[in-house]
Amino acid sequence: MSAAAAGAVGVDQVWSWLAEVPDPEIPVISVVDLGIVRDVAVDGDGGCTVTITPTYSGCPAMQVIADAVTDALRERGVRRVELRTRLSPAWTTDWMSEEGKAKLKGYGIAPPAQRVVDISGLRKGGDLAAGVKRGAIAKPKVVCPHCGSSHTENTSQFGSTPCKALYKCLDCREPFDYFKCH
Amino acid sequence: MDDIVTYLLRQGDNALILSQRLSELCGKGPALEEDMALTNVALDLLGQTRMWYAYAAELEGAGRDEDRLAYHRDAHDFRNCLLVEQNNGNYADTMMRQFFFDTWHYFLIGALTRSGDARVREIAEKSLKEVTYHLRRSGDLIVRLGDGTDVSHAKTQAAADELWMYTGEFFNYDAVDQAMVAAGVAPAAEPLRAQWLAHVGDIFGEATLAMPSPEAWMQKGGKQGRHSEHLGYLLAEMQFLQRAYPGAEW
């Protein structure tokens, strides 16, 4: 019988369990590495509330992630799992942990290469037109996860999942996925 | 129906109908990369639809949920702009429709991140990055198609001329839109139109395309439920299951 089944469960314990729940599309990183777990709260009665935030609005993996989180905690003896979704602040790849980025690279996916759109700046009256002006948008310097060369080229803005773009390395000639800045 | 519910339904309907149109091209894109791109854009729009519908349904409080709104309404209940229901046509038509929509969507969503309504602001913040990516892509493609071969240039120009009359509706504000502006929920039409014209003008310039006159005659009616014949066919396919087996669930 696990400790949780006997009564209250610790917040740190829940976080460490969640750190073992893999992303369904990219199983080398966990939902915690991905930065989508916003909050964990426990009550004295063996119940637990996990707040998650969606990555892409229509990402089909979100439902799978929600189910995986619930199942993982139930399996470890948490009696009641409540899942909440929070939209704001919006998830960006900046929420991804450094460890997560390193794991992505090891798996052959180039991690996000720059900081994302500063939404708070836009809200304060930033120039929207500048955000879509051709030529004014800096291209990310994407490093090949196989050979480390930054001599790479974008082949498609969209890849096999909403979070990725396709690149190829012009030195080692390998194609690879890039987890885009978002 | 409350003005804000109608306003939210318009946002959701625009996203859903365009998403459905793009999904029709799944497996039929002109190149593998384009196929993936179109369906990914469709997916983003579908996700945004759910956020708008969920909020509209909550405020309406009539027991309708996202699925009910998507699958149990007929054409005259939809409040999307006429542009998004237009057929896919050739690839220049598809991309021109996308570019006109993306440009409006980007400046609208950008403005809505400053909305006086907290939930609208959250949905806009969530959508903005996706919408930015869409516009960068469609603008790029318009330049490549317009400034491409003689054939691609001619087709892209024809698409622009054909679809232009559906772009006036974005800025043709009715009582609902005006009430939303007055309530601080939505941005005013004129600045949005100026931004739209400026960006379309920039891209058309690079694409060597002639921009139709902003003063040209414009279609209207979609936002009030008066649609072109295309929407009925689209809904017939999208809603088939719920029409044949009402209330069916997975």
Image: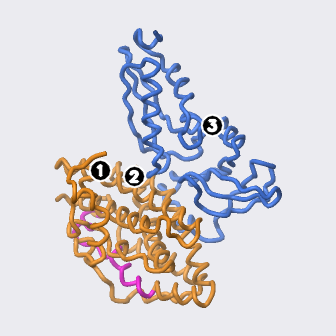
Chain colours: A blue, B orange
> In the image, what residue occupies the spot 43% across and 64% down?
B23
Give the residue type at disc 2: Ile
Residue A29 higher or lower than A109, as above or below: above
Q: Chain of mark 3?
A: A
Q: Residues within 10 Å of mark 3 (few under 14, many from 20)?
A: some
Q: Is residue B125 left or right of residue B165?
A: right
Residue B180 higher or lower than B189, as above or below: above
Look at the numbered disc 1 and give the secondary structure of its residue.
Answer: helix
Horizontal and vertical percent position of residue A35: 55, 38
Q: Is residue B170 magenta?
A: yes
Look at the numbered disc 2 and give the secondary structure of its residue.
Answer: helix
Q: Residue furthest right?
A: A171
- Asked whether the residues under marks 1 and 2 belong to the same chain, the reply is yes
Q: Chain of mark 2?
A: B
> In the image, what residue occupies the spot 75% across and 52% down?
A143
Whether residue B49 appears in this view of the structure is yes
Residue that carries the numbered disc 3 in the rendered image: A28
The residue range painted magenta reads B161-181
> In the image, what residue occupies the spot 67% across and 64% down?
A155
Q: Are marks 1 and 2 in contact (CB under 8 Å)?
A: yes
Question: Hey, which quadrant is residue A173 in on the image?
Answer: bottom right
Q: CA distance from mark 3 to mark 1?
A: 35 Å
Give the residue type at disc 1: Tyr
